[in-house]
Amino acid sequence: GSVVSAIGSGLNAIISGIAGLLEAIVYAIVTVIATIFDVILDILCCRCCGRRRTRMRTGRRSYSRRRLGRSTY
């Protein structure tokens, strides 16, 4: 009984290790694919809506500067 239990525990540990390794590999691949997809979308959005985005960014920067100026006084 104890020999079979030890073999079962060993197999369980090996299978768990392999599963963890596969999970890490799949997570890394999905992360890389999502990052590439985000970069492609950013490039497409900058080409299509570049003027609108720059206006929004400058508006945010001026607002944050005003806000910082008020907080220091």
Image (cartoon, rainbow, N blue to C red):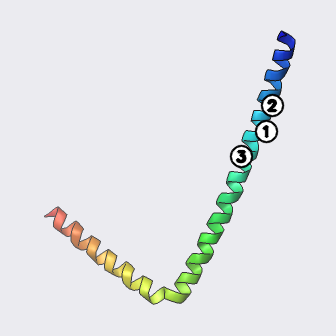
Q: Quadrant of residue 38?
A: bottom right
Q: Which residue is mark 1?
A: 18
User: Which dot marks residue 23?
Assistant: 3
Residue at disc 3, secondary structure: helix
Mark 3: amino acid:
Glu
Q: Quadrant of residue 48?
A: bottom right
Residue at disc 1, secondary structure: helix
Seen in the image, is 57 located left or right of residue 47? Answer: left
Q: Quadrant of residue 37?
A: bottom right
Seen in the image, is 59 located left or right of residue 34? Answer: left
Q: Residue at x 33, y 75 (%)?
A: 60
Residue at disc 2, secondary structure: helix
Residue 47, position in %: x, y?
A: 55, 87
CA neighbours of label 3 inside 10 A, class few (<14), some (14 to 19), many (20+) = few
Mark 1: amino acid:
Ile
Quadrant occupied by the N terminus: top right
Q: How many marks?
A: 3
Seen in the image, is 23 located left or right of residue 15? Answer: left
User: Which dot marks residue 14?
Assistant: 2
Residue furthest front in the image = 1
Mark 2: amino acid:
Ile
